[in-house]
Amino acid sequence: QLPKLADGPFQGLPRVFGLVWAFVAHTDSRFDSNTWCAYIHAYQEVQPLTIGELWASAITLRIILIENLRRIAERIVYSRDERRIADEIADRLLSAPAADQTEDDLIAELGPAAPSEALALQLIHRLRDQRPALTAMLGRLDDRLAADGRTTDSAIHDEQQRQIAANVTVRNIITSMRHISDVDW
């Protein structure tokens, strides 16, 4: 019964969904009642909201924050699985006799797909400063990343930045959920 969006990525969904999604995206999931009120007032200067949309905004805000938390949790689980795979590969390589290892062993373990940042970070952490054959394998990992337009340093940096951003966003979501509960809607 709420007005729907006619176009864009949320086409067919209630307009309040797009409104709240944009608020959450622009504030990194950080809710503050003063910012929220200023945002709603600014929106209504262009397009007034119905009373139903105003009532629905609080529950929509909670839903979108929880959806954002779900998305981040999914990414955390994916990164954890990638680190586990990297640990298994590193364990096999570290336990193999040095005389039997070649530079291509790591590439053979990785398969044809480009490694994720989480997997590359964990492999670098585990294999760096080991015996010469393993150092050469990391050189091949650099080559594989370069073919994908990345470097070892950029992969490490990107994964660390993703982890930091996820931590901040999760903190914002939990704090925001508390603040939302305290607001007299």
Image: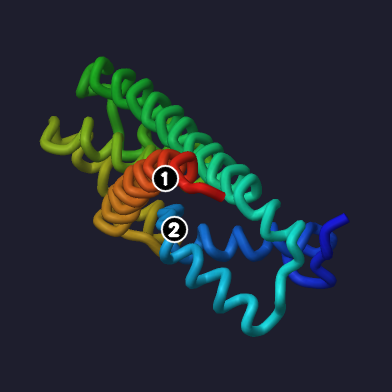
- Asked whether the viewer can see residue 159, the reply is no
| Image coords of residue 10 (percent x, y) | 75, 62
60 or 165: nearer the viewer: 60
Which residue: 71% across, 76% down? 48
Picture quadrant of residue 54 = bottom right
- Asked whether the viewer can see residue 158, the reply is yes
Disc 1 to disc 2: CB gap under 8 Å: yes
92 or 154: nearer the viewer: 154
Which residue: 35% across, 51% down? 165
- Which quadrant is home to the N terminus? bottom right
| Image coords of residue 52 (percent x, y) | 76, 57
Sequence-wise first label, 1 or 2: 2
Q: Residues within 10 Å of mark 2 (few under 14, many from 20)?
A: some
| Image coords of residue 122 (percent x, y) | 29, 35
Q: Give the spatial CA distance, label 1 vs label 2.
A: 8 Å
Q: Secondary structure at mark 1?
A: helix
Picture quadrant of residue 18 = bottom right
**Residue ID for mark 1:** 179
34 or 142: nearer the viewer: 34
Q: Which mark is residue 33?
A: 2
Q: Residue furthest bottom?
A: 46
Which residue: 50% across, 66% down? 37
Which residue: 60% across, 59% down? 21
Q: Secondary structure at mark 2?
A: helix
Q: Amino acid at mark 2?
A: Ser
Q: Is residue 43 above or below residue 16?
A: below
